[in-house]
Each structure stands twice: as C-alpha cells, then as structure tokens.
Amino acid sequence: MKHFFLGLCLVFSYLTFAQETYSIRGSIKDANNGETLLGATVFLKDTNIGAITNEYGFFSLQAPKGSYTLIVSYMGYENLSQNIDIQKDMSINFELTEASTSLEEVVIVAEESEQLNIKTPQMGVSKLKSGTIKKMPAVLGEVDVIKSIQMLPGVTNNGEGSSGFNVRGGAADQNLVLLDEAIIYNTSHFFGFFSVFNADAIKDIKLYKGDIPAKFGGRISSVLDVRQKDGNSKNYDVTGGLGLISSRLTVEGPVFKEKGSFLLAGRTSYAHLFLKMTEDFKDDKISFYDLNFKTNYEINHNNKIYLSGYYGRDVFNFDKVIENNYGNITGNIRWNHIFNDKLFSNLSLIYSKYDYQIILDFIELDWVADIKNYNLKYDFKYYLNDKIKLDFGVSGITYNLNPGEVKPSSPTSPVNYLKLDEKRAFEGGAYISAEHKITDKLTAQYGLRYSNFFRLGGQSMTSYVNNQPVVYNSELGIYERGEEAFETYYEKNESIETFDNFEPRLGMAYQINDASSIKASYTKSTQYLHLLSNTSSVTPIDVWTPSGKYIKPQKSNQYALGYYRSFKDNLFSLELETYYKTIDNRIDYIDGSDLIGNNTIETEILNGEARAYGLEILFRKNKGRLTGWLAYTLSRSEQRTLGGLAGGPGINNGDWYKTPYDRSHDVSATATYKLNDKWSFSSNLVFQTGRPVTYPNGQYTYEGLSIATYSNRNEDRLPAYHRLDVSAIYKPNNKPDKRWKGEWVFGIYNLYNRKNAAAITFNQNNQTGLNEATRLSIFGIIPSVTYNFKF
C-alpha cells in the first residue's frame, strides 16, 4: 500500500508545471459572525484558475506571476473582488457580507456555485443550508434535516413515524450519518417525528448519494455529512424558538479575546404536559432533549483546535408498564494544521455511542444495549498545482457492540438474567484521491480506498454441522436452525475473521459549453456493519452486528451518468442522473425469524444479493420572489436470496423480489414565495408509490384454529403516500439595525388530512367471524405555530 501511494504521488509530481508559479492561500469567513464558509469559490478573473474552500473555510490556488483580479463568491453573499500582484507566495483572508436579497437565493444548491458544479466531476451530491431548512414546512412546528433531504430525488423513507431514510433503494443502515465527523447510529427523536439535528446549531449539510469521495468508508448507499456552526467569534448572540410541543435555545459568542468562539444549543419537548391533561394518558410520558456544544481556539495562523460534542435522549413511559429511553453521545477533538501554502491537515479523535434501555414492568424485565466506537483519523489536502488537488489520509475505528443484557427488575421477576455476547471489531482505512483538470473542458476525480476489518474475540463462537447455521427442511418446506457441532473460545486479542478490500472511485465531467455538462462516475464501496431488524424501518431496539464467520461484508458497485444544464443566466437549472447499483452479501431473514435476544443471529438469516436502478430529475428555479424545485425519481430496488449452503429454494423460490425500500415513483415539489419584507410563504407536495408489503392470500383451519397463508414476500404494496404542507413566516419588525429580531412561523402539515397508511393488519372479527383489514395512520392534519427570535 505504501508503494502505491508513493508511486501515485510521483506520477502527479511529473504533471507539475515547469512555469514558475506561486501560491495564494487563506480563509473565507462571514463578516457578521466570523463563521467559516464551506464551499465558497475563489478564482482569478479571465483565467481557468480557481479553488473552493474546504470544510474549514481554507483555500489554496497556484498561478503564474502577474497581475490579476481575484473574485470571491458564495451563494447568498455579496461578491468581493480585489486586484492582486503575484510576485511571491501570498496569504490573504477574506470576509464576505451577506446579500440584502438573501431570501431570493437558490434554496438548494450543489456543492459549489452552479457554474463550478457544471465543471467539477462530483455528482450525486446535494447541499442544504440551515436557512433553507427553516423555510420549509415541518411536522409539529419543528424544522427537520432528515425530512428536508427527503424532498431531494432518490431519497425516501418508510412512511410517517419511521426513523432514518433510504437512498437509491438502499436500507437505512447503509447510510453513513456524521455530525462533526462522529457517527450517529440513530437519527431520530420521537420515533422518527423529529431528527437529532437542531437546525439552529447546524451550518452545512451535504448528502453524497452517488459518487462518494474516497475519504468516506463503511457504508454503501450514501453519506450525510452534517457540520455544526463554529459559533460567533465577533458578537454574543442568542437564538431560540417557542413551539407548541418543543422549544430551543442557542447561545454563541467569542472567547479567548476573539481568538476563538463557542456555541451551546439545547432543545427540549414538553408533550407529556399535554398528556397529563387527558384522563387516558395522564400517567404517560413522551419527551426528548438534546444538547450541542462546540468551541475552537486559534493558536496561530497555522494551527487551530476544535472541540465539539452532542448529547441527546428520548424518554417514553406508557402507563408505567413500558419504559423506553435511548440516545446518542458524541465527542470530537480536532487539530487543523497548515504545513505550508499547499498542504493542509486535520487530525481528529472521535467518540460515538448509541444506547437504549427497555423496562417492561408487567414482566419485571430490564434490558440495556449499546454500540460505541473510537475513531482516530488523519486527513490531508495537498494543492499540487492549479490542475491537480490531492486528498489522502488514514483512519482506524474500534467497535464495541453490546447487543443486550437482560436483567430481572425485581426479586419476584420470572425473568432469568441473560448477557448476550459482546462483539468487538476494528476497521482500518487508507485513501488517496485526486481532482485533475485534464483540459479546459475535461475534469476527472479518481481515487482508491483500502479498507480492512478484524472481527475480534472475547467470546465463544458456535460451529455447525456441515458449516450450515441454517438448514432447509424439505418435508415441512421451511428453513430451520442448523445443528450445533462445537464451540470455540477466542481471546480478546485474537482475530475471528479478517477482511480487506480495495474500493476504487472514478468520476469524469465534460463541459459541453458554459451552461451544460455531462458526468459519469463509478464507486465501489464496502460495509462491514449490519443493522439487524425484521421491521421495515429503524427502531430503537434494532441490533448492530459486525461481519464475521457467517455474515460477510456488503459490497456495492454503483454506476452513474448525468446531464446538467442552467438556463437564462442560471434562473433555471436542470439535473438528470441515472444510476445502476449492485450489492453482494445483502442478508435477509427466514420466515418466522427471531432476532430479539438471539445470541446466534446467523441461524435466522440467508445471504443474498440486491440491485437498484433509476432515473432522477431535478428542475429548479433559482432566483426571484418564487424559488423552489420539482424532483422526480423513477426507480426499482430488488433482492434475490438463494438457499446457498442451507439448500432449498431460498426466499420466493430464488426469484427477484422487491425490497421494502422500493418506490416506483417519487415526486416532490418545494416552493418558497417572498411576498414582501414581512411575509413569505412555502409549501411541500409529496407523492410516493406505496411501500412493498406481504399480505395474507388465504386461510385454512387446523384443529379448530384458523391459520393464514401469505403471498410471496413483498408482492403487495401499501396505498400510495401523498400529502401537502404549507407554512407562512411573518416578521413583524424587519429593520436590520434592530437588536431583537423575531418571526412567527405558521404551518399546516398534511393540509387535506390524508390518512396515509403506516401499516395494514389483518384480523378476524370476533362477533361476525369475518376477516378484516385495519389501516394504521399516524398523522392527519396538524397545525402548528412557532415564535423564533434572535438578539
């Protein structure tokens, strides 16, 4: 591996210009609060030389000596131009002023300005700003990052009240969700009604759903990279909101004599106060709270330290019978270092934990489980010249997965103590990638990631006769648990199983003209962790398990092709992307599988393969009083699970069947209209093909019992899902020099009260004896009002 990196760097070094060039480096910040601006563009006028700021607002470019006009731009801010005379290496920092017409900006933009998006090879990536999310209608008056990205093409969920999200036909666990580089394992509050991301604390959100950069690994569908604000380094600010069931407060300001800043943000809900007003629910409690923290200190111009963290918790207590609490904890300390004008680095030590507890008072049971990891990563960015930029780095993650400890909660409990085996693993990675401007019209982005994974010991492993944890009973026509042969104990420092994989990435962009381009990409990725759940959406009690002897890593190959065009000086833009994705080693569950409290999960699953393909269309209006977009996705997501070593026909007789994440048609429209300085309006319209499900198709009677028979897996669908949301924002006093700024947000979720089906169950009426289907709907029409303030 070392020789590969050395050889690749030597190849790049030969491509360096012979002409004498100098470096211009610096940072770009918001003039109002000192926040660094990610994705701002810096370019030399009348040349093809330019750069984009990284996650920390840093840029570097190289140019021959001479006089130039340097232009700095960022969406929603006034452009800045400055004449410079390049005779030596230079360091220049810029501060941009927010444009007075910021409400008329593009509400959803690509990674950089639209013109550069046409040129860069990155595809399948979208960026949302927190200001955009705050303008969109939201459930129960709380704006939501996860629900906002579901308005993008290729992104769906499993219906109202479901956690997580699905990208291009993939499962929720195939998405890598990062908050300031820390892994978030459960993104939901209120079982999916809200997300863990507080919009007041968020600066930037990127969703990579296709051409995933080589620096990211461990998931095969997408990466959601969420960055918290650094905090205002110039003034003390207080921001907050008061809603019907939740409120939030954020405080930020300078520290260390303006050499640093801090941000502290909190949210809490008080829905349980309303429950106490009703006789049926007065003993119930449903609430959540979370806390975001971030601070930084600039040691000198070349060194800066960041410290950030998150803590969130959900608490449920139903009639003092069932208690459930779960939450995430993250922490990250980072060191940014600038070696010279061309080399930038970021060293991070990250901690992440997700845990849950369930107490069942009626059987006196207490169940606790968690997953935690430590991650050390060192990333570098090297600006070789104005044609080649390199990214490279290494990382190592240790995992400790505790699937559950079951304890009796009282001396009279009938429950026996059970401690499931803790699972340990280590995942390492190294990568290098380059963005290479081959010609004025052709740009490439290529790279390679190497990953390895060690399933570590500290537990006993069961072996099975004929190496079959699952066997097919041909007489009964069902899959059963295999016969155990013996157990082997592995010490903590022993490796039970080892995997390693090379994951190449390639992207190409050809600029047809100043307004259009075509792009193509290929991404190979590997996922070593699996979320075990036989429900269609993420739940708090789902179990994560590592790859090992019987569960192999998931491997994905994704091919994508796209066409991009802007019209009328970027008044309108069109993005077309088509993709084809294959997945090896995608597990599925045998009929009647039992995952809860199971120490030998391998006896409940079969290994299969999956494929997904589709067409995504995004048409946007980027300027004017009315802005917004229309997104449409035509797609298919399928799986095939053969019997393999277990024998038998597999699932659905080995034929392809729809995954639970298949949506043939997905249409979403978002619009924002600014009436005047005081009033603005927005709306969302959503339509999705219903989720695949399995319905009973008959019944028979055996010894007086009525037993249902079922159709093939996922052969049926729920009814189509659709809704319309609207909101209005009223700013009673919009004077820019007024310290206190407030606004009222009025919203209606599901305006025409559509009773969308979360599930359909089938039962027999005890009085009539007839079979009945019951539709479960979570949300009807929900009005909301929120008061937001800042001072």
Image (cartoon, grey):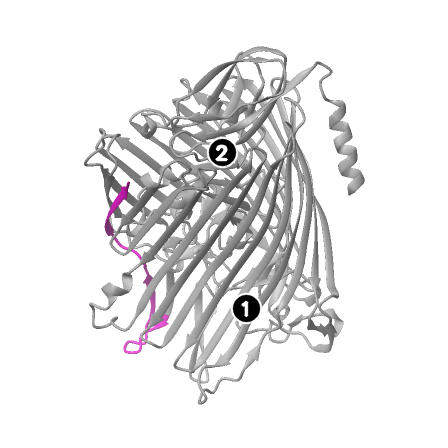
Q: Position of residue 268 (x, y in %)?
A: 33, 57
State the residue in front, 44 or 705. Answer: 44
Indicate left or right for 791 with 643 as reference: left
At a point 48% along the width and 57% down the height, the residue shown is 186
Q: Does the magenta run of residues contain 186?
A: no
- The amino acid pointed to by label 2 is Leu
Callout 2 environment at 10 Å: few (<14), some (14 to 19), or many (20+)?
A: many
Chain-order first, disc 2 or disc 1: 2
Name the residue beneath numbered marker 1.
Answer: 591
Q: Which residues are magenta?
A: 763-791
At a point 38% along the width and 50% down the height, the residue shown is 265
**Compared to 731, does 752 lie above or below?**
below
Q: Which mark is residue 38?
A: 2
Callout 1 environment at 10 Å: few (<14), some (14 to 19), or many (20+)?
A: some
Secondary structure of the residue carrying tag 2 is: loop
Q: Quadrant of the N terminus?
A: top right
Secondary structure of the residue carrying tag 1 is: loop
Q: Which residue occupies the extreme top position in the image?
A: 67
Q: Does the magenta run of residues contain 788?
A: yes
Q: Position of residue 130 (x, y in %)?
A: 39, 40
Mark 2 and mark 1: Cα distance apart in space: 48 Å
At a point 46% along the width and 31% down the height, the residue shown is 29
Indicate left or right for 6 with 76 as reference: right
Q: Quadrant of the C terminus?
A: top left
State the residue in front, 329 or 280. Answer: 329
Q: Position of residue 67 (x, y in %)?
A: 57, 10
Q: Which image quadrant for residue 10?
A: top right
Is residue 722 visible to the viewer in this orientation of the structure? Answer: yes
Front disc: 2 or 1: 2
